[in-house]
Amino acid sequence: MSAAGDKSRWPRPSLGAVADTVGLVLAAITVVSFLVVRGGWLLGLSCAVLVAGAVGLALCWRRRRRLPAVVAAMLIMLGAGGAGAALARAAPARPLDADLRFSPVLDPVPYCRSYPGTGTVPDGYQLLIFDRGATGPYYFHSQAERANQGWVARRVGIGLAPTAADPDLDEGARITLYAQMVTEETARVLRDRDNIAIYPERPDAQWLLRKLPGRTVDAVALVRAAGLGECIPA
């Protein structure tokens, strides 16, 4: 075969065709990267199989080839199933059925006491306790503990602690206690003392937040009484 024949059989691609091919490859890489970040390699590979099956089915349908069309349809089902499983695994469970409430509280309450509650905290989530006065930021206390018949927030001190010089300090203050449902990752950020560095010189420093994290499952309005309650002064 002559050199002229080779050139006619394999024409040189135009600059526009090369640019289009590079653009398609970059777009495919971008889509696959997004899918891998969103749902891992399972989602990326499943979507690739799904697309390959769809393209194969379209080509087989035009050429009326039944056996390859069946294989392409099976690839589509396999890819769709894998993508659905990857998305379901990546998405955290939504605690829509979690009915969590503070147990009834009789006012007034001392500076420090434990607050029990009802309902079961779903797996993968935690219940964080905050309080706030009439104004100002939200004060993070601790993570509620799971109990046999619900949950309990132990030794929560609200307002200012009474002192020997002023045993009635903050008596009559109105404070709201909040129970916030957050993911385990959010709870880990807030509860771990090694992650708190607002006041490094204070070992008991806690987070003060302008907005509450997660979802408010319950809130109870309290009135402060005199006395320390369950907390023992240092």
Image: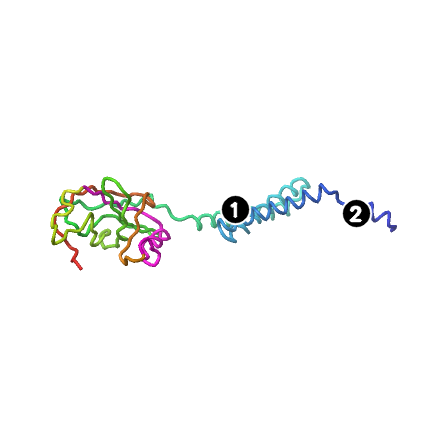
In-image side of 190 versus 73 (left or right): left
How far, Cα to Cα, is label 2 from label 1?
Answer: 38 Å
Judged from the image, the secondary structure of the residue bearing numbered disc 2 is: loop
Amino acid type, callout 1? Ala
Q: Earlier in the sequence, mark 2 or mark 1?
A: 2
Look at mark 2 in the image and give the residue it sits on: 10
In-image side of 153 versus 86 (left or right): left
| Labels in figure, total | 2
Q: Residue 168's x, y, as percent?
A: 12, 48
* Residue 36 visible, this orientation: yes
Image position of 200 with respect to 72: above or below: below
- Numbered tag placed on residue 80 in the rendering: 1
Q: Residue 133's x, y, as percent?
A: 23, 42
Question: What residue sits 26% from the left and 45% below the top?
Answer: 178
Q: Residue 204's x, y, as percent?
A: 26, 57
Image position of 44 with respect to 20: above or below: below
In-image side of 150 versus 4 (left or right): left
Instruction: Tell me which segment is drawn in magenta.
Output: 174-199
In reply to whether residue 88 is colored magenta, the answer given is: no
Question: What residue sits 78% from the left and 45% below the top?
Answer: 12
* Residue nearest the viewer, comparing 194 with 99: 194
Crowdedness of circle 2 by 10 Å Cα count: few (<14), some, many (20+)?
Answer: few
